[in-house]
Image (cartoon, rainbow, N blue to C red):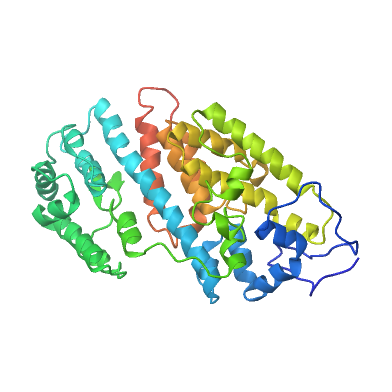
Amino acid sequence: MQRFGSPLALLGLFGMLGCTGAEPSVPVAPLPDGWVSTILETPDQVLALFDADTEGWAALHRGDLTRALNATEPDLAARAHQELYDTRQHLLSLLRTTAPELARSWAAHTLPSGTALHTWAALVAVDADVDPTPLLALAPPPADSDWAHVHAALGSDLPEEARFAVVADRAAGTVGDCLRAHLAVRQSNSTALASLDQACSEPFLQEAGGTRAFPDPLRLHTWILVHPTPSPPVAPLAATVFSASWSPGDQASPATGPTATALGLGLASSPDEALRQVQSATETLDRWEQAGPWPGATLAADLDAFALYRTRLITAWAEEAAEPAITAEALRAIRDTNAGRTIGPTRPPSLLALEATVSVQTGHIRAALPALQALSPLNPILPELPALTEVVNDLQVASTLGRSGDSKEP
């Protein structure tokens, strides 16, 4: 057995990498140039990239963003920040779906007297520049004076744009102070989010002696606004490895790039069409993977390169779907049953967050909980996650009121 480079163990994840001494055979079908073909054809080039921060690249590979974000290697850190940014974007969509649904579900079974839940949900709507009036109409103004002021501010004649800024200016009391603190951070483009800890109480809303508690509905959006989308690495391999972009030509839009087109991915008008396209793309990738016993085959297998790429590409493609049901079917088709309910190469954080979001959007609320629980190792860098998971739990309960045997457990 011939070894290329130095034997390498990446936190026990990549394993000992080796290859046969055979010359590359002629592939059945030529692979397009890209990060997976680079692994297969010139593995030493990939190992040289990993050598800059072996443990950091291994962490990014398995979705350990806590470790990858602290990398000293700039390209690696940029990739980790992009994954965190994408994950937060999906969690924000989850919050904006869950909060109004929770208020409506509880209202269908009579909201508790004096509650501010519908006002809290209306804040989520306003932060998304959505008219809060239907949510405010679910119940009378809250009994708490501060929340009653917010309710009045939300119910005022708001403009169609920049609603949140107007509400923050009009609101009074401690909640109003918190809204203005968020607005100040956003307008100054400051990343000093710690300043919000002084202005915003935690929990943001607490009722029934603490048995009902709801998080600050603005923090996810504030974080996203003050942390712009990271610039991708300049080096092609560093920018694309472990991503949905097979090659630099796919980076602008992996879902519609040349590789996605070559794999037969296009507009899907129904869940059945989405499944058909995913199956067809998978068949082509399987043919590419079996193209021949190339020198990097061992490394590609250790990295699960083809399965990882398939997951990333289909996820990016599913995000572009017009209907949540289409997205949900595409994600179901690529779910790795061997990966369990943990973060990993084929279950990256952004995918788990997207799965949770489309589960709620399609009414399968219980199905969102395993994905959110799988994200729990990232609580230190996603401090909003535990409270958001509890809100989804609450929606699961509220949506099943009147049935027997329901609980807040997934």
**Residue sitting at x 38%, y 33%:** 397
How many numbered circles are shown? 0
Question: Residue furthest toward the top?
Answer: 403
**Which residue: 23% across, 68% down?**
188
Q: Is residue 358 visible?
A: yes
Q: Is residue 237 above or below residue 126?
A: below
**Quadrant location of the N terminus in the rendered image:** bottom right
Question: Compared to 397, does 175 lie above or below?
Answer: below
What is the x, y in percent for residue 74?
52, 74
Q: Tell me the residue at 21%/35% (across/down).
A: 135
Instruction: Give residue 21's position: percent from left, percent from top.
Output: 90, 64
- Place of residue 279 in the rendered image (x, y in percent of width and height, measured from the top left): 65, 35
Residue 109 visible from this viewpoint: no
x then y, percent, for residue 322 = 42, 36
| Figure check: 355 above or below 239 | above
Q: Is residue 369 left or right of residue 214?
A: right
15 and 211: which is toward the camera: 15
33 sits left or right of 168 in the view: right
